[in-house]
Amino acid sequence: MQTLNIGILAHVDAGKTSLTERLLFDHGAIDRLGSVDAGDTRTDDGAIERQRGITIRSAVAAFTAGDTQVNLIDTPGHSDFIAEVERALEVLDGAVLLLSAVEGVQAQTRVLMRTLRRLRLPTLVFVNKIDRAGARAEDLVADIRRRLTPHVVPLTDVTALGTPAARVRPRPPADPDLAEALADVDPSVLAAVVDGPRPTPDDLRKSLATHTADGSIHPLLFGSALGGQGIPELVDGLVQLIPPSATGSGTARGTVFAVRPGPGRERTAYLRLYDGEVAPQQRLTFRRHGADGRTVEVSGRVTRLEVVGRSGPLTAGNIGALTGPKDIRVGDRLGQLTERAPQFAPPTLETVVRARRPEQAAALRSALLALADQDPLLHARPATSGATVLLLYGEVQKEVLAATLVQDFGIEADFEPSRVRFLERPAGTGEACDEFPWHDHTHYWATIGLRVEPAERGSGGLFGYETELGALPRAFHQAIEDTVHATLLSGLHGAPVTDYRVTLIRSGYAAPLSTAADFRGLTPIVLRRALGLARTRLYEPYVTFETEVPLDALAPVTAHLASCRAEFAGTTGGVGSWLITGELPARRVRDVELALPGLTHGEGMWWSRPSGDRELRPR
């Protein structure tokens, strides 16, 4: 039996979880249909997901169609959790991009399609909710071609659209629209259409499968997840048009794309295996790139293994949930580490979290650090007075974290209002040194010399040595390195310093007088002097934005965006609206969101996501 790993992606509320339920039910994987409203769906199994009616974490479920096992990865739809979606894409064989026949192309839909096209991931487009009032078909296809991709071809039609009697009808194999769409991407079909003889249905089927597989064309199907219309045609499309990825039988090789806490607080890792085999009690070694560029290894024995959709060992092409190796993280690689994991834009917001009950301050910090350790995109660090600084993508993520702390850890926490997070980077190179014995204010029995200089973008904080190995006891070396990173959490302007390289250029100690405390005390003094000589520049986060506004609102909206220092990438006219794209300082996003309803009479749509940072310009 072959396996397909398929992701279901969509803008929030387009019906992803309902479609997953329908696919599982129709193929006998579950005995009754769950409901998002009732909170009893198979994949949204977390209490918070059921309460809020949204998908927060990627979940995996399987069904069998003929001789193919389809593993469905139901991904979040809210933009606050876009990183969770992008991590899942790495392990997929193909995807279903879901749209509502009523709401049509939405902001998150455009983001997802851009990513799918960039990865050239085989993707079927499924237009859901054809039985709802206001559903559209032909003009929606035109909208998809204009705003998502020109290379989309409908394989089904709809009768009684927008009514409970809506039904799906397959298009004929020799459909002229199919030949025309394929001619845009397949030279042999183009030659047959222009010069004859006309391509046969078999020619068109082969061409459609080839160009769906390479991501150059996207079949489109209509249906209803709740009513079940169009589901057989969707499954046929998945099995016939999306090829399973190539697998091998050599050394085990795979990627961890999700980590969940288990019943006993142990970590359960979801592993997509590409080659080889994994069995219970087998010892595995996972690898990742550390912040300093070195390879970090995590080893352990598999104490529990559940293979999605089948029994026995985990074989190539399949997904397994395994427990055993400690400190395993999302993005860890089983086998040789040949390339860096995908890089995601860091969060642009930060908040300070405090336990509502002071006696739970230590437990709160431990809980947040544990959650951050499982998820590399959740950043937490200690702050003063028992508080914790947390980096976030959005307000919904903050609400979910608050609920998680209550339900999983029994901790009620208060979050300060979110603020935009600035960063500092070294502008040049600076060196400083202090040697003992001193007759000044320091009185530390230690010699430390440090050089601060810029490091490569995205490298974070690096620490190295020019002193001889063994010149200091290991504990003193560790004290200097740990203190360097802790000190640079606040730079010359009060923001965290990043993309720096600090090098120990001189060291000394006096046995038995020197202690690690001497090195922890002197390091910030020397480091601050070196940083002052290097100087730092302040950077602010930017976002990429899209806003769709009525025709008569173009001028006031662009004027307001310009006043917020937006940089425009393009303005595209459509049917009754303008689509404006560009980049904007993250600190001005809230200003735009508050002004947009008034400028567009409540008809404007807005979407934004982090896109890196830029040096702060004078106001």
Image (tube, rainbow, N blue to C red):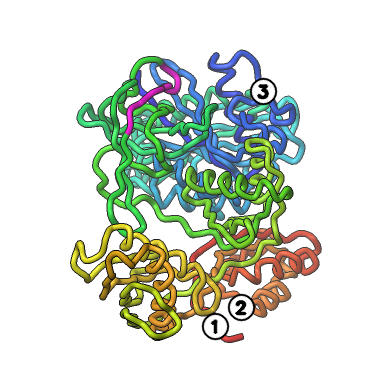
Query: Residue 565 bears which disc, if any?
Result: 2
- Please tell me in which quadrant of the rendered image residue 350 appears: bottom right
Q: Is residue 419 above or below residue 157?
A: below
Q: Is residue 382 above or below residue 465?
A: above
What kind of residue is marked 3? Gly
Does the residue at mark 3 contact the one at mark 1 (Cβ under 8 Å)?
no
Q: Position of residue 458 (x, y in %)?
A: 39, 64
Q: Earlier in the sequence, mark 3 or mark 2?
A: 3
Q: Position of residue 520 (x, y in %)?
A: 41, 67
Give the structural element (helix, strand or loop) at label 1. Answer: loop
Tell me the quadrant of the picture where the C terminus can be found. Answer: bottom right
What kind of residue is marked 1? Arg
- Please tell me in which quadrant of the rendered image residue 479 appears: bottom left
Task: Please name the residue shown 44% across and 23% down the image.
Answer: 308
Q: Which residue is mark 1?
A: 617
Q: Earlier in the sequence, mark 2 or mark 1?
A: 2
Task: Please name the residue shown 67% across and 26% down the image.
Answer: 226
Q: Closer to the camera, 606 or 271?
A: 271
Query: Residue 34 bears which disc, if any?
Result: 3
Q: Is residue 537 magenta?
A: no
Q: Which residues are magenta?
A: 300-310
In the image, taking residue 269 as reference, residue 44 lies left or right, namely: right
- Is residue 600 at all visible to an observer of this figure? yes
Q: Closer to the camera, 546 or 35?
A: 35
How crowded pointer 2 is (Cα within 10 Å; few <14, some 14-19, many 20+) is rated as some
Q: Is residue 306 magenta?
A: yes
Give the structural element (helix, strand or loop) at label 3. Answer: loop
Residues under labels 3 and 1: Cα distance?
A: 52 Å
